[in-house]
Image (spheres, rainbow, N blue to C red):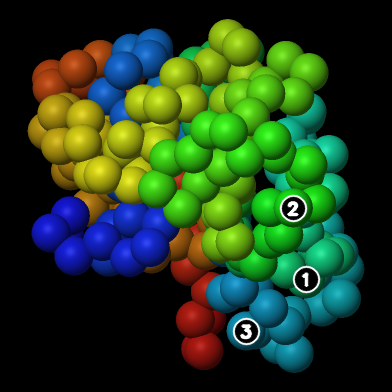
Amino acid sequence: DAESPTEDGDSTATPLERWVPTSGSEELLFHYRDLTALETHEDALQPSVIEAVPTLPDGDSAAVVEDAADGTDAIDSVLRFGSEGVVGNVVVSGSFDPDALETDGDSSVGAFETFGRDDVSVAVSEETIVVSPADGADLEAILAAGIEGTDRRVDSHGNFAQLTDRLGDSTFLWGEYEGSDDGVGAAFSWELGAER
């Protein structure tokens, strides 16, 4: 429902539907983990299972997220997407302190402060961090998809929309999609529930 965005954008779409822009490589790999759902069922899971689930994203974005988050408990979910070899676009939701990243405050998009660090472009708000590597999707395109609801892959690629529709609200998700409207994809997802 792009008609009723929250401060950081559309709250009704799944992160995969909301943040992945149309632009970028036709080959798309994606990974998602809902740490809030995992925490909800923490008492029913073995401690080794909880410990095995990574809280921070991989690569250069881990340091950015770690600097802005007050401990890993502040992270609610992690979405990574990109082409093969470049699964480095990251969208992390949670509670963050933008001032901890020493943004210069000169550039902003909606509630996000944007800046560059090392080889990545970063956008940070109090609820979301978006990191795009130099060889990943353009940061502006990711923000346009996530905040404004424009140029989303789910809207321009019918088969990708069908794939995401079947996945629903997954706790863990990984998969791939290749092509445009007539593209093909496959995904694996797990959903933690009260009885499963």
Residue 65 in the image: x percent, y percent? Answer: 75, 47
Is disc 2 placed on a helix, strand or loop? helix
- Indicate whether 145 appears above or below 38: above
Give the spatial CA distance, label 2 vs label 3.
29 Å
Residue placed at 73% from the left, 68% from the top? 74
Vertical side of 41 occupied by 158: above or below: above
Mark 3 residue element: helix
Q: Is residue 150 left or right of residue 117?
A: left
The residue at which mark 1 appears reads as 73
The picture places residue 35, in percent across and down from the top left corner, at: 64, 66
Which is more toward the observer, 130 or 194?
130
Residue 147 position within the rendered picture, expressed as x and y whole percent measured from the top left: 33, 47
Q: Earlier in the sequence, mark 2 or mark 3?
A: 3
Front: mark 3 or 1: 1
Q: Are marks 1 and 2 in contact (CB under 8 Å)?
A: no
Q: Which residue is drawn at the image coordinates 13% and 22% (left, top)?
A: 181
Distance (Cα) linking label 1 and label 2: 19 Å
The residue wearing badge 2 is 99
Q: Which of the 4 image quarters holds residue 125?
A: bottom right
Single out the mark in the foreground, 2 or 3. Answer: 2
Mark closest to the chain's N terminus, 3 or 1: 3
Q: For the residue marked with disc 3, what is the amino acid?
A: Thr
Can residue 51 be seen in the rendering of this structure?
yes
Q: Quadrant of residue 24?
A: top left
Task: Classify residue 111 as left or right of residue 94.
Answer: left
C-alpha span from label 3 to label 1 = 12 Å
Q: Nearer the viewer, mark 1 or mark 2?
A: 2
- Three-letter code, disc 2: Asp
Is there any visible trace of residue 176 in the rendered image?
no
Q: Which residue is mark 3?
A: 40
Three-letter amino acid code of the residue under disc 1: Asp
Report the side of 48 relative to 145 (left or right). Answer: right
